[in-house]
Amino acid sequence: MRLENQHIFITGSTTGIGEHMARRFVAEGAKVILHGRDNERAQKLRSDIGETSTAFVQGDLGNAEELDRVADEARSAFGQIDALVNNAALTTRARIEETDAAFFDRIISVNTRAPLLLSRALLPELKRSKGCVLNIGSVLAHCGQANLLAYSVSKGGLMTMTRNLADAHGPDGVRFNQLNVGWTLTENEYKVKIGDGLPEDWPENVPAYANPFGRLIRPEEIATAAVYWVSRESFPISGTIAELEQYPLIGRYTNHEGED
């Protein structure tokens, strides 16, 4: 098993990509500290994938005062942290006209500030274990779309943070890498698009330029990729931003042959 004897803390891991990472990591032999705001959902997941292999820390990552407690509980769950996966993120839609200071601050607090503060809080433990941090970003970090302005800014900041910390902490033996994820068909993404007015079968009718292989990325495929980055197999690679998308980011629209 590729993650045997690894102790991994995953934020936002009771749904979506985070849940699939938790499932895959446990299957690969890891002990996983789950995080979320819904205790009932977390306990159901623990029952499903193994209570002896999991623990749960509850907390709002947007509240900076909670983060030291969250980090302490994660550390004490199994007595060690080998990897931190900063996965939790808000994806609330808003164009610039709808993005006031409070909205922007909330997005940044969860998507960018929390990964920084959790990395800081757990850095001494990661130095001891010669561990790693894996940040889950987005291809939208490079530019984004009009109704995800604050989200795109937050993921761009996360990308710079990953490179900065990788540069700073290589001598400490702590690695920092990031996965910039493309359009992935999570349960939440499905519901968001239904809320946007798309029909129930919208995943079967995504334009070919957006999914050239005929379907969207599945969350379990992101989880499979993440195994490598949190494992000892990826040592000593650090500072990498890996784009997990179906096409090169440069050329996506240049090569799009559609209506004028």
Image (tube, rainbow, N blue to C red):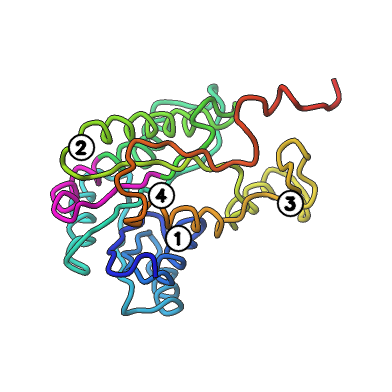
Callout 2–callout 1 Cβ contact below 8 Å: no
Q: CA distance from mark 3 to mark 2?
A: 41 Å
- Which one is earlier in the sequence, the residue at label 2 or at label 1? 1
Task: Kindly identify which residue carries mark 1.
Answer: 21
Question: In the figure, residue 45 lies in which quadrant?
Answer: bottom left
Residue tagged 2: 169
Work out how far the residue at label 3 is from the one at label 4, CA to CA, in angstroms: 23 Å
The majority secondary structure of the magenta stretch comes to helix
Please say if the residues under marks 2 and 4 sit with CB atoms less than 8 Å apart: no
In-front residue for pair 235/91: 235
Q: Is residue 185 left or right of residue 39?
A: right
Disc 4 target residue: 88
Which one is closest to the eye, mark 3 or mark 2?
A: 2
Q: Position of residue 167 (x, y in %)?
A: 25, 31
The span shown in magenta is: 117-135
Whether residue 31 is situated above or below residue 109 in the rendered picture? below
In the image, residue 107 lies in the stretch drawn in magenta? no
Secondary structure under tag 1 reads: helix
Residue at label 3?
203
**Sequence order check, earlier mark of 3 and 4:** 4
Residue 10 position within the rendered picture, expressed as x and y whole percent measured from the top left: 35, 57
Q: Rate crowding at label 3 as few (under 14), some (14 to 19) or many (20 or more) other CA atoms within 10 Å.
A: some
Q: Residues within 10 Å of mark 1 (few under 14, many from 20)?
A: many
